[in-house]
Image (tube, rainbow, N blue to C red):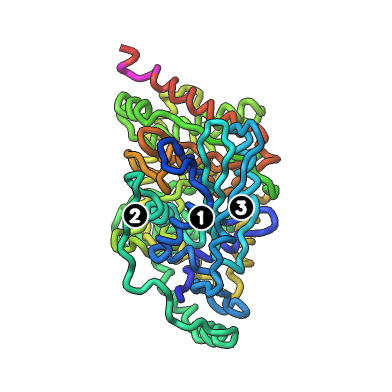
Amino acid sequence: MRQLTSLDTQFLALENARQCGHVAGLAILDPEGRPGGAPTAADVQALVLERLPLLPPLRWRLKEVPLNLDYPFWVDDPDFDLDFHVRELALAAPGTDEQLADQVARIVARPLDRARPLWELYLISGLQSGHVAMLTKIHHALIDGVSGAEITGLLLDVTPEGRKLPLPARWADDEPVPGDLGMAARGLMAVPKYPLRALKAIPRAIPNLDETSFATLPGAGTVSGTVRRVKRAVTGEDGPVNNRERLHAPHTSFNGRVSPHRRFAFGQLSLDEVKAVKSAHGVTVNDVVVSICAGAVRRWLVDHEELPGKPLVVQVPVSVRTDEQSGTYGNRIILMSAPLFTDEADPVARLQQTHEALDGMKERHRALPASLLQDANHFIPPAVFSRAARLQFRLARSSAGRPMWNLVISNVPGAQFPLYLAGARLVANYPVSVITDGMGLNITVMSYCGRLDIGIVADREQMPDVAKLVGWMGEELAALGAGAPAAAA
């Protein structure tokens, strides 16, 4: 048995009839040259079964503690059914990218079955290109970006022939799973630990409450700001200035209550072009990615006559996983905030502003404790944790308050050499991430083999034309290339 952390549990708590807590990925596979042609569901099942001993999260199912006395546990599923998890479907002719995007949007809008291990895999044929798509869904309570990449790495190979991986000494959990009475007893034994957890968390969490979801609560910014000033006065340490008080997210149409339905758009950009812009302007690849996202979102806001006169606020997930925590799965992240300069019309000026803002974000990140989100959650007893988390989500989108963030932008580095799955070459790997009430737009970019694979998820009702963002990102990149100092000379 393995217990979920408070942060893992928070991804379970956000789920309701309109929003899900799983992340997904759309892999495009080229079967050319593969013996036997395109991979089938049976081929993928055989691959998963072969490597299942190295992929424990794929066997875990959720075990709740009665009365929510403590956080839930992951236990090995004794009735694990691979046929349930690996599925196969085909697009109707002609099998365009638009049809694929619609199919992905429908599948990711459906919740995972909590009575089973929280993942699904869909092999999708009938693509106009002759390729095969593979859509994987896995709950965010199980993985973050880094641990998700570890799972993907165990399924992918560097050659079409595959590889033989060493099996662990023990791959099944031999510990018997307690019944409801046993779980209730464990929960009762944990109750005295709640106050101790909260007391230990106070020194790390209170000065930084405005960098957590508690920032939506009235007075949170005042409390954390006051504590920081007192700490500086007592210790004499300057420390980085927290800029949460300067970041006020304006309301946009994608910051309301989301519907149960999604839209998905995907596309690619040249990583070489991004690196050329990076070098010409003296910034980073991530600066370029965030800046072109800002330019594309600005165009959408202008198109819909709702461009705010100040920057949006973007959520940037940052991994705090150490090398020693490799292979531990779960979530080890901090959710950072940065201004998104949609109010700046000039692409080059926007890029420089982005560079400076993200530099400041990195400085704040270095000063924050790695366990900040879990420390903040420890102020809420597990018995009321889910209700409290849902209340925070409602506050984040309420008209009475301000949204903490307008959207998510994440840039994930990936392998720069060809990879293969069941003998088929991986052509692209588009991320498909999460949206929630108050934050109905997510842009995630993953680099792979000389390209940036873009996956954009939005609420179906709030942004029916979200696909425009992909083309605009390309145009924004071209504008930065044309405005580079080398090009001007």
- Relative to the observer, which residue lies in front, 309 or 322? 322
Q: Which kind of residue does numbered mark 2 sit on?
A: Ala
* Residue 283 percent location from the top left of the image: 33, 32
Mark 3–mark 2 Cα distance, whole angstroms, equals 25 Å
**Farthest residue toward the top?**
489
Q: Earlier in the sequence, mark 3 or mark 2?
A: 2
Query: Which structural element holds mark 2?
Result: helix
* Residue 474 among magenta residues: no
Based on the displayed image, in which of its 4 quarters is residue 48 positioned?
A: bottom left
414 vs 393: above or below: above
Q: Which kind of residue does numbered mark 1 sit on?
A: Gly
Q: Residue at x 44, y 30 (%)?
A: 269
Q: Residue at x 51, y 84 (%)?
A: 186
Q: Which mark is residue 221?
A: 1
Q: Is residue 154 visible?
A: yes
Q: Would you name the residue on which mark 3 appears?
A: 396
Q: Which mark is residue 367?
A: 2
The residues colored magenta run 482-486
- Relative to the observer, which residue lies in front, 90 or 433? 90
Answer yes or no: do the residues labelled 1 and 2 have beta carbons within 8 Å? no
- Relative to the observer, which residue lies in front, 52 or 2? 52
Q: Earlier in the sequence, mark 3 or mark 1?
A: 1
Mark 1–mark 2 Cα distance, whole angstroms, equals 17 Å
Answer yes or no: do the residues labelled 3 and 2 have beta carbons within 8 Å? no
Q: Residue at x 42, y 42 (%)?
A: 35
370 vs 401: above or below: below
